[in-house]
Amino acid sequence: MSISTAIGDNVLSKVTGHVGDEYQESMVHKSQTVAFSVVPTFAFLAGAILAWAIPGQRSWLSLLVFLPVVVPELIASGWLKAHAPRPKGNFKGYRGLAILNLALALVMVAGIAFNVGDGQWSLITGAIVGGVVALIFAPRIAAKRNAQDEARLNAQADLQEDL
């Protein structure tokens, strides 16, 4: 059992123990989905503010706001991978949020470049290129992972049927 599965199962058992019925449990999970989807936006906002507020080389510390976003996402993805295929990555409904996140990321990178790089545009250019590449390839990577997860879970189910 992976650490992601252990953490996820522990959290789920606690949530299930605190709600009255399946409907409440479903609604708790839906509300957490809503919260989880906007956390990156607030992390980008905090990062943008900190990038401009923290002087000099310490401006890089603004990137630390992503630890509480990335680590839980890795845990959630690891847990989901053990139980069901991860989503294919249909990001069309998130276009507005993605544009807002991209704008906040650019403000953050500009703040870091201004404070650290004395106006060096290579940092900003690299961040923009990296962001565009991520936007192009993220749906493809998500679809590939979904297919791999489906194949793996189907193979596991077939093995259990043969036993």
Image (cartoon, rainbow, N blue to C red):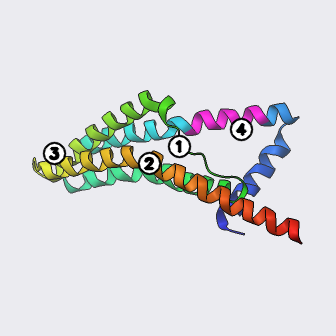
Magenta span contains residue 29? yes
Are there few (<14), some (14-19), or many (20+) residues within 10 Å of tag 2? some
* Labels 1 and 4: the sequence-earlier one: 4
Residue 54 showing in the rendered view: no
Q: Which residues are magenta?
A: 26-36
Main SS, magenta region, reads: helix
Asked if residue 150 lies left or right of residue 50, the reply is right
Residue 138 got which mark? 2
Q: Disc 1 versus disc 3: distance between alpha carbons?
A: 34 Å
| Label 3 sits on residue | 114
Are there few (<14), some (14-19), or many (20+) residues within 10 Å of tag 3? many
Rendering coords of residue 8 (x, y %): 70, 55
The quadrant the N terminus occupies is: bottom right
Viewer-nearest residue: 106 or 46: 106
Q: Disc 1 versus disc 2: distance between alpha carbons?
A: 8 Å
| Label 4 sits on residue | 29
Are there few (<14), some (14-19), or many (20+) residues within 10 Å of tag 4? some
| Label 1 sits on residue | 89
Look at discs 3 and 4 and give the one toward the viewer: 4
